[in-house]
Image (cartoon, rainbow, N blue to C red):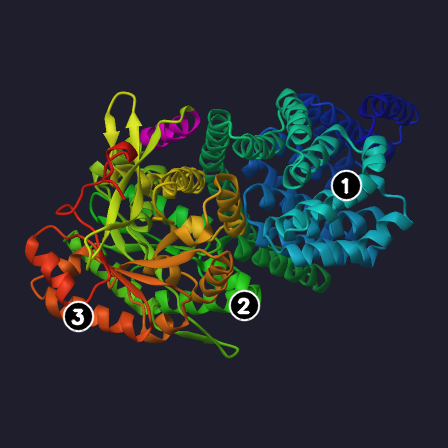
Amino acid sequence: MIPTDPAAALILVQEAHELASQVRDARGTARALILLGGALLAQGEIQGARLAFAQGRETAVAAEDGVTEARALNGLGLVARADGQYGDAMEHHLASLHAAQAYGDEVGQARTLGNIGALQSELGDHELALHTYREMQQFATRAKHVPLQSAAGVNVVFALHELERHGDVIGTAQAHLPFIRAHGLHQHEVVLHVNVMASLVATGQAEQAAQVGAQCLPVAEQYATREQLTHFRITQGQVLLETGQLSEAQALLERALEEARRCGWVPQERLALGHLSDVHARQGRWEQAYAHGRAVQALDGARRVQDLDRKARVLSVQLHTEMLHRESQAERARTAELAQMAEHLAAAQHHLVEQLRHDLLTGLPGRAQFQAELDRRLAVAGDDPFSVLFIDLDRFAVVNDALGHDVGDRVLQQVARRLRATVPDSGVVARTGGDEFSVILRSLGEPGHATRVAHKLRTGLTAPIEVDGHVVHVTASFGVALAPRDGVDVITVQKHADIALHRAKQAGRNGVQTFDLAMGSETAAQLALERDLRAALTRGEFLLHYQPVFDVSSGLVTGFEALIRWAHPTQGLISPGTFIPVAEEAALIVPLGTWVLHEACRQATLWQVSRAVTMSVNVSALQFEQPDFVKTVREALRSTGLPPGQLILELTESAVLRDPDAAVAQLRDLRALGIRIALDDFGTGHSSLSLLRRLPIDALKIDRSFVQDAAAEVMVGVAVTLARAFSLHVVAEGIETEGQRALAQALGCDGMQGYLLARPAPADEMPPC
């Protein structure tokens, strides 16, 4: 009754407390005080709840009621957690766990393990929480305590969802749902279905998620708490978003956001803001989408700083508790019975401490231990400077998606072993995220030492990894910060290492970047440019220039290449080299590329009146990988009326090489529309002859660096020979001198473009066709 109607429960509990006090029933009084604390906590009266639980504990100790004492300690942990004191919360929960173990109270152990798992989950340690919830499930099952059995199952499903193991979420939930319904645990059913709906959406099954939501809605409205109902509505809003019901999704999410903010439910506020940002983006309201996205980032930033402090405090409590346990172990071993109890307690304590300190999958130190060690070394950094490396595996999600999480986990174990084998014994290697690792290196007296070690680690990771018959190639990006030069506290050093890592990814991944002060200001400038880009999309500040493509033999114009320009309101025309990398990083390249495609096709249709010319449009790797890209191209052709044979899509080698098998399938679907495909900047990537043979393309565009190279005749000649072998059209780019034009003619190129022939310009300045 306390979760659903705390006000009514409070009245009943107060009456029970008065009755127990009148008859001088110490145990009854203690238990009534604990129920009173629970009712007060449910109403948000933290100080009153703390006093009730503390009095309940004192009364239970006086009555020698160890089971009730354990429940009181557990209640004090819940109060501390509600007050944001996670270190105190863990201390109370561990004391409760010890007391429940001492009295053989399996129900108490299950209840406390559930609260410890909730702490771990709130701190982002979802793998650790999953393990704790499964231990809770074992105790609850042995005790045959139905509500705790059900709660443990729901918690397991929640942890699996946070770990993005969506298939396991759906399977586990289906197995657990009959148990929940058989015992009429309606609130658990609502929470279970919220996680199932979210996992169905994540796996592209939005329609099925909508069906689940419709079936669960009456149960949620009748039985769910306000917080549960708000979370249910947020998930419903996500489902409506994915099924294209944007107005309905917006209304539901705004209602949930208002409720979350009024009640101070930050996780629900963050979810609602994130989905509203997606809604606005899909409606083309970029300013609102950007504002909501920034609000999510602000909440995440505050949460990261808060979690760092909380994790450090929790780790400190764990280690202190272990030390106190060791000091008192001899005294508890006086009798055989007490010695046996101490042994069980020590094992449980050691297990909890090891889980917090170490990553279960790789055996490396976890995030909390890494941050504690970083804090310790910073305290003495003046005498012993050191380096911090942030490592992020490139595109590791592809491994999990293609080969499964089991293979991905074993690859991570291999990566961990390689890092540990290469880092000197004086260093620390930790796994600090899903595919993220961090390293602390002792300085050898020179700044370049860390960079050399990082390159050595990077090289070591490139060797193929074999798992169950699969050969996996892994690359990684590295960010390096030097302490105390780049910061004297944990948060600053980690922020600067993260900025350097971000820069390494921007530079094309599989590289090493060391932080310098300019990166910080450049990051701020990039954020400002990203903000202006979002506004520019809304205000329509972009335009296209066109560069003609000439036939080598006749010298006539055969087509045009569309090149985007940004007419900034204060900075004038901005070249794509400045803003395209920012657009790609912020995923704005997708809507930007869609606009370019439609505008180029529209202009090409106008030119078809006088002569059939082709229109070439550059496609970014991210745009090409979108599941609906073929549909986008089809719609551009339909809405503008451009004949498909007049459209050429240009892709770089690097875009194709990101996932060759998927690229080949996508290219075949595009060519089925009747359009043509050109491989742009040919020769600058690493494509092989076997890949070139597989690619369904029509043309090669030889990069300007080849045409302008001293050995241009040899390089261009090889490229033309290759093209002829595969029956491909050849266009030479970067023609800037008469000698280069003569070379293109002599070597048999079909087309050419460059500043010698014509510079990019607006459509009304193009030469006649």
User: Is there any visible trace of residue 105 in the rendered image?
Assistant: no
Residue 15 image offset from top left, x and y in percent? 89, 22
Residue sitting at x 79%, y 27%: 36
Q: Give the overall secondary structure of the magenta segment.
A: helix
Sequence order check: which comes first, mark 1 or mark 3? 1
In the rendered view, tell whether residue 103 sits above or below residue 486: below
Which residue position holds label 1? 213
Residue 567 image offset from top left, x and y in percent? 29, 27
User: Circle 3: is it few (<14), some (14-19), or many (20+) Cα within 10 Å?
Assistant: some
Q: Amino acid at mark 2?
A: Leu
Instruction: State the separation of the CA atoms marked 1 and 3.
Output: 63 Å
Which residue position holds label 2? 403
Instruction: State the separation of the CA atoms marked 1 and 2.
Output: 31 Å
Asked whether disc 1 touches disc 3, contact meaning CB atoms under 8 Å apart, the reply is no
Tag 2's secondary structure? helix
Tag 3's secondary structure? helix
259 horizontally vs 14: left or right? left
Tag 1's secondary structure? helix
Stretch in magenta: 527-538
Which residue position holds label 3? 717
